[in-house]
Image (cartoon, rainbow, N blue to C red):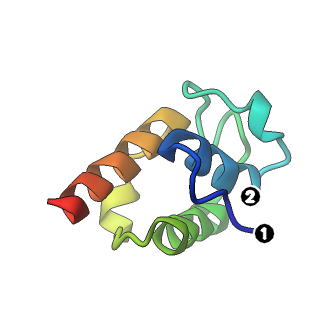
Amino acid sequence: MRADPTATVDSRVVYIISQLVPVKPEQILAEHRLREDLGMDSVSSMELLSMLAEELDLDVGVEDIADVHTVGATIALAKTFLAKKGA
């Protein structure tokens, strides 16, 4: 199931993350750490990268997401790439 394409970037990213962790979207906060708080591992991190690329039509590389550790940072990264894409 895909995220609602009319939803905000924030809610779309949270929805994508919720598909990879055992936490409901409404319980995921920007300050949550992907690994420590939500239980993501390296495999789910790669899935997140792939899902962000597919859902938001972004060309995000592994090196771009390497320093992303929180939900908020993931949202910021998506917004940065969307802004570059729209420029």
Instruction: Relative to 3, say whether 50 is above or below.
Output: below
Mark 1 vs mark 2: which is more N-terminal?
1
Q: Quarter of the image containing the N terminus? A: bottom right
Mark 2 burial class by Cα count in 10 Å: few <14, some 14-19, many 20+: some
- Residue 37's tag is none
Query: Mark 1 = which residue?
Result: 1
At horizontal 82% and vertical 41% (from top left) the residue drawn is 23
Give percent across and percent down for residue 43: 64, 68
Q: Element under label 1? A: loop
At horizontal 42% and vertical 72% (from top left) the residue drawn is 57
- Residue 20's tag is 2
Instruction: Relative to 50, say whether 39 is above or below.
Output: above
Which residue in the rendered view is the most extreme toward the left? 87
Q: Quarter of the image containing the C terminus? A: bottom left
In the rendered structure, the answer to whether residue 18 lies left or right of residue 83 reads: right
At horizontal 67% and vertical 59% (from top left) the residue drawn is 3
Give percent across and percent down for residue 51: 58, 69
Q: Element under label 2? A: loop
**Residue 26 lies in quadrant:** top right
Give percent across and percent down for residue 32: 61, 29
Q: CA distance from mark 1 to mark 2?
A: 12 Å
The amino acid beneath tag 1 is Met
Foreground: disc 1 or disc 2 = 1
Q: In front here: 87 or 46?
A: 87
Q: In front here: 2 or 6?
A: 6
